[in-house]
Image (cartoon, grey):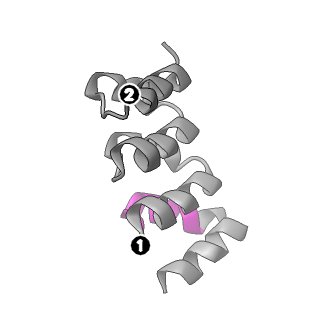
Amino acid sequence: MTPKEAYYKAYNLGLRIPELEPVISKDAKCSYWYAVNVIKSKFILAEPAISKNAYFIFHYATDVIKGRLPDFMHNQMILNNNTYAKEYVKFIK
């Protein structure tokens, strides 16, 4: 099963499915949407995957955490030094 298939299964059921989380957590996009649309909270297992994509790190901070990212994600975002990093710095101030 792909991360996308696992995410859609959980999304369509509207349930957290812990046994699918290791699969979902391999993809930043699916992990972000799982955190936002299914579990409506942090998805710690997926944070390493999410942290590889500036777009999803920023939106994870604003839509899920609603504040400062965990240190390793925060540092990754700042090191990216892109538009999302600049918006993130404004957001956490």
Closer-to-camera residue (62/13): 13
Q: Residue at x 58, y 83 (%)?
A: 90
Tell me what residue is drawn at x 57 percent, y 40 percent.
29
Residue bounds of the magenta highlight = 67-78
Q: Residue furthest left?
A: 18
Above or below 78: residue 64: above
User: Residue 35: horizontal and vertical position, in percent?
Assistant: 41, 46
The residue pinned by badge 1 equals 67
Image height of 84 relative to 34, above or below = below
Q: Position of residue 16 (x, y in %)?
A: 30, 34
Q: Residue at x 51, y 46 (%)?
A: 50
**Which residue is farthest top?**
1
**Where 88 sits versus 65, above or below?**
below
Q: CA distance from mark 1 to mark 2?
A: 29 Å
Would you name the residue on which mark 2 appears? 13
Determine the main secondary structure of the stretch shown in magenta.
helix
Which residue sits at x=35%, y=23%? 20
Q: Is residue 16 left or right of residue 11?
A: left
Label 2 is placed on what type of residue?
Leu
Q: Position of residue 80 (x, y in %)?
A: 64, 62
Tell me the crowding category of disc 1: few under 14, some 14 to 19, or many 20 or more residues within 10 angstroms, Cα based.
Answer: some
